[in-house]
Image: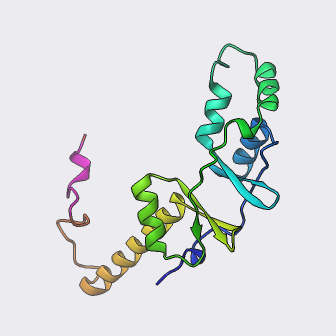
Amino acid sequence: MISVDEIMSSTVYTLTPGNCVLEARLLMNEKRIRHIPIIEDARLVGLVSQRDVLAASDSSLHELSERSRLQLEQEHKLREIMSTEVATIDYRDSLKSAALRMRKYRYGCLPVLQSGKLVGIVTDTDFVGIAVHLIEQLEEADSETWGDDFESDNNSLPGTEANIDSVV
């Protein structure tokens, strides 16, 4: 069994409920992340997604100047926009169980806990990385089986269209 701690990101960027929307937006842009766990007294108390930040930044702010928008983003606290019912996963849980939960409930991430303490985060991007790695392994195995000379008429995965170029 592959466990969550084998693929999770252990570097987790967090903020507190008292941080402002501007700080979250800047952190997301700088670190190229889409989810920020919200921590208070060393406990996970919420989660802010890129969607939450965009909604708070964009809602009725289109007509405002950049300066006015920045001021409002500074006044708007994360406690006002964070999700407080956060699904988490234990670091020892299987990767499969994490993937199934994320797919079933359409989660973009699962904060990873060890004894109630945040130790990592697993995201949909982590699973895309795994998928790419598996596809590369399949292609390599196929190449070793058939050799480089063999060209298949159907280079698609089972259940997919063979000629993707013709799909509009």
Q: Position of residue 141 (x, y in %)?
A: 33, 83
Q: Which residue is pictured at 62% across the width and 42% down the height? A: 50
Q: Is residue 161 magenta?
A: yes
Q: Which residue is pictured at 21% across the width and 46% down the height? A: 166
Viewer-closest of 155 and 9? 9
Residue 32 appears in the figure: no
Here the colouring is rainbow
Q: Is residue 82 left or right of residue 16?
A: left
Q: Position of residue 22 (x, y in %)?
A: 77, 36
Viewer-closest of 158 and 51? 51
Specify the segment rendered in magenta: 159-167
Q: Which residue is pictured at 44% across the width and 52% down the height? A: 106
Q: Which residue is pictured at 79% across the width and 38% down the height? A: 20
Q: Is residue 167 left or right of residue 10?
A: left
Q: Position of residue 96 (x, y in %)?
A: 43, 72
Q: Is residue 71 above or below residue 107?
A: above
Q: Is residue 84 magenta?
A: no
Question: Looking at the image, how many numbered discs can be counted on the residues?
Answer: 0
Q: Position of residue 136 (x, y in %)?
A: 41, 73
Q: Is residue 85 left or right of residue 66?
A: left
The residue lying furthest to the top in this view is 63
The residue lying furthest to the left in this view is 153
Of the 4 image quadrants, the one containing the C terminus is top left
Question: Majority secondary structure of the magenta segment?
Answer: loop
Q: Is residue 53 above or below residue 118?
A: above
Viewer-closest of 161 and 13? 13
Quarter of the image for residue 123 reads bottom right
Residue 140 appears in the figure: yes
Q: Is residue 152 above or below residue 160?
A: below
